[in-house]
Image: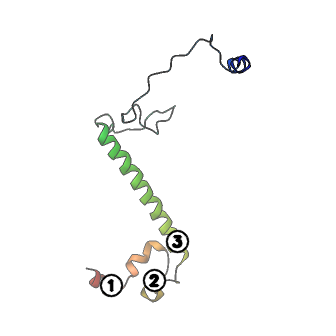
Amino acid sequence: LALCATSGAAFNNFFAKKEVAAPAVPVNTFTIDTLPGALAPVGLFDPLGFAEKADGNTLKRYREAEITHGRVAMLAALGFLVGEKVEGSSFLFDASIKGPAISHLAQVPAPFWIVLG
């Protein structure tokens, strides 16, 4: 029994000065100071000051909208590149749409727009 107590005491320093930890921020707190993504040299990048005027729920909504719009933009860029790659091999419109993707919309046949509208 004494052997267990002495071996356990070897890994625990009872006389060391204990550091006082900073008070923990509650999990449900979402403020401009605790917002994830602030970088050290710049801090929080908010040139128009939207975050200063917003409460916690509005900040969450802004962050969610930012992430959603970023994902949609990434998918749009991917779709543009895929459209360039599969030119002429599409089953839509008898593969009659040719050229760069920026001009594809103007090449869509008029009956399609009538049916769509």
Q: How many angstroms separate mark 1 from mark 2 (CA)?
A: 13 Å
Task: Give the alpha-carbon distance from disc 1 to disc 3, as whole Å.
Answer: 22 Å
Q: Nearer the viewer, residue 47 or 74?
A: 74
Closer to us: mark 1 or mark 2?
A: 1
Please tell me which of labels 1 and 3 falls first in the chain. Answer: 3
Q: Amino acid at mark 3?
A: Val
**Could you say which is closer to the camera, residue 74 or residue 23?**
23
Q: Residues within 10 Å of mark 3 (few under 14, many from 20)?
A: few
**Is tag 1's residue or tag 2's residue first in the polypeptide sequence?**
2
Give the residue number, with chain letter if any, for mark 3. 82
Placement of the N terminus among the 4 image quadrants = top right
- Residue at image position (39%, 76%) is 105
| Residue located at (49% from left, 83% from top) | 90
Residue 1, numbered circle? none
Mark seen at residue 112? 1
Left or right of 29? Residue 12 is: right
- In the rendered image, which residue does mark 2 sit on? 97
Distance, label 3 to label 2, CA atoms, is: 14 Å
Q: Earlier in the sequence, mark 3 or mark 2?
A: 3
